[in-house]
Structures are given as structure tokens and as C-alpha cells.
Image (tube, rainbow, N blue to C red):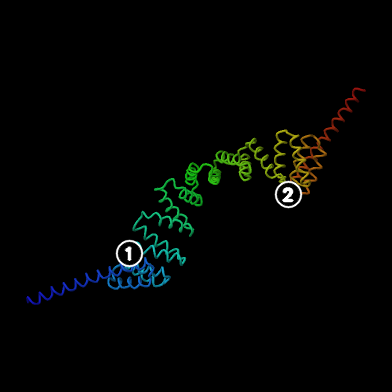
Amino acid sequence: MIHCLVYNIALICAISSAEVDSSSEARRHYAWGVRYEKGGLFEDALVQYRAAASLDPENAKYRCALGELLYRLKEVRAAKDALLKAVDLDSTYIRTYYILARIYYDEAKYDSVIQMYRNILSLDPNRDDVRRSLAELYRYEGMDSEALHEFEVLLEDSPEDVGLLSAVGALRLKLGRLEEALEVYDMLARLRPGDRKVERTVARIKRKLGDYEGALKMYRSLAEEDSSDCEAFLEVLALSRRLNRREEEVWALENLIRLKPKDTRFMAELAGVYIDEGKLDKARKLLDRGLKLAPDDGALLVMSGEYYWRKGERGRALEEYRRASADPRWKEYAERMILTLRAEMEQEKLKEERQKEEEFFRRGRRGS
């Protein structure tokens, strides 16, 4: 009995010693593999990593090292096998997911890349580089809500990061979260004064939110800062008309004519404003300038007709409307004005005839 007990103890010790020896031997092979890999002796490193994995088959680190080197040597299938085995052995060994993510990215398997990034973040939420890569990949894949969430998490720790603010603002804007987007772009405008792209975005959001006064102020500022910014002047024009701000409408039209001296549309529009304000001389000069460039332009001819009508020269006004009716864009309006003007002229003629009749009868009564 005593002999049997002694034998069992000896056997256990021998087995334990063998396990210790194999683990120690595996570590030794792994260390040699690392050295060989650093020295560029990749085939020798593979031999050592395989030996380590064989001696300690439950160690995920050895499988991961083997898989990473195989990937480096472009043996992708074997690399995946080794790495997936490492995941099976230890799903918390984070390095494995990094290498798998790179492999899947090369293969354009972005769903798998996303899953690898998620695995990494579930193990270590503070890996900001991974979270940023995940956010960008979500964005690339059109998963805007998911991308926005990840960018917003990053922004909590870096509230003045211009890149993050730009990403969050753009995604909120794309998702229709206008008020939240405006908060971000206001912050960007403070951090990057003079950034016209940011200021233009702020103005555009204000307009969409119905803050026309705020939008007009922003676009006017943009136009004043850059007198060649045609888009800003067009926005000032549209908003000033919406708000019935005649002074700013005139300012925008004058500058648009300066920027587009051959675009007769703005000349016709400004001439119309001048006519409404009774500035007939200014209107005439502008119309003459435009008609030299485009003698058959319907808009200019209509305004010219308005000018002569206002001056009391109905015959000349009628002629201008007739010419304008040849322009398909203004045909209907011009013909309506012709009918209106003819009716007015007819009424005037009837009035004159009645006055003559009345004068005739008055004279007759005086004579009798």
C-alpha cells in the first residue's frame, strides 16, 4: 500500500514537472520567435512560434503571434486560422482582434471589421483610436446614427476637437437634427473665426430653422468680407425680399450687377425696384444699359413698359409690351399688360369724349 502511494506521488510530480517544462520550453521558443522576427528572420520565427503553440496549445498569445506573422508574410488563410483559434482559446486577448480587423479590412469585409472594433471596445472602452476608426467606418457604410453616437462619445473627452466637432455637426445636419447641429457649428465658428465654410453652414442652418434675420446677418457679413462672393449676395437678395428689406435688396442687386455685368436679369429686377421707388432716371439708365446687351430681353422690355407707363407715355409703353410678348417667358404677362393698358387708354378716351360732349352742351346752353 505504501509502495503504491509513493508511486502515485512520484507520477504526479513527474507529470507536473513535464507540464512546467513544456510551458517553460514554449516561452523559450516564443522569445526566440520574437527575436527572429525583429531581426527579419521570418521563417525561423515561424518555426519558433509554431513550436511554442505546439508545446502550449491553450495559450492564445502564441497563436496570435503566429497568425500576425503569417499575415505579415501574406499567408492570409493560415493567419486567419491561427487568429480564430486564438479567439477560441481566449476571447479577451485583445491583440487578436486588431490583426483580424486589418485582415477583414483588406478583404473589404467591413461588417466583420466593425465587429472586431466592437470587440476591442467592449474589452477596453478607452481605445479612442479604435472608436474613431469605428465611427469613420460607420460613416463610410452610411450608418450615420451609429457613426454620430461614436463621434459624440469621443467629443465628450475632447469638446474642442475641431475634427470631431466637424464630424458631429455634419452628421447631425444630415440627420435633420438642425438645432443640435447649430450648437456645434456655433462652437466651430468660435474656435475658427473667419472660417467661411463654417459661417456659411451656420447661415444655412439658421435659414432652415426660420431665423431669417440671423441668416441675413450672416450672409451679409460673408458678402462684406468677400465682395466677390456671388452666392452670399444671392442669399442676401432672397432673404431681404422675404423680410421686405428694400435697402438690402438694392444693395444685393447692385453688387450682383457688378459681379455679373452681362446678366440682364438683375438689371431688370433693380430697374423694377427703382420704378417702385419713383427713381425713374436711375431705372431708365439701367434699362438702356441692359437693352444694349439684350435688345429682345422680355424682362427688360416689360420694365421699360412699366417705366413709360409710369411716365404717362402709354403709346411707348404699349410698344414695349408688344416687343416683350415675343419672349416666351414673358408672353403671358406682357399680353395681360397690353390688355390692361388698352382698357385704360379706352377708358381715358371715353372720358375725354364725355368731357367734350359736356363742354359742347354747356356752350350750347350758354349760347341759347
Residue 321 in the image: state x and y as whole percent.
78, 43
- Disc 2 residue type (three-letter): Arg
Q: Is residue 94 above or below residue 284?
A: below
Q: Earlier in the sequence, mark 2 or mark 1?
A: 1
Describe residue 77's horizontal placement relative to residue 310 as left or right. Answer: left
| Along the line of sight, the residue nearer the viewer: 87 or 179 | 87
At 90% from the left edge and 24% from the top edge, which residue is drawn?
Answer: 365
Q: CA distance from mark 2 to mark 1?
A: 72 Å
User: How many discs appear?
Assistant: 2
Q: Is residue 92 left or right of residue 303?
A: left
The residue tagged with tag 1: helix, strand or loop?
loop
Pick the quarter of the image with the C terminus: top right
Quadrant in the rendering for residue 216: top right
- The numbered mark at residue 329 is 2
Q: Point out the frontmost of discs 2 and 1.
A: 1
The residue under label 1 is 91
> Where in the figure is residue 117, as x and y percent of width and height?
40, 60
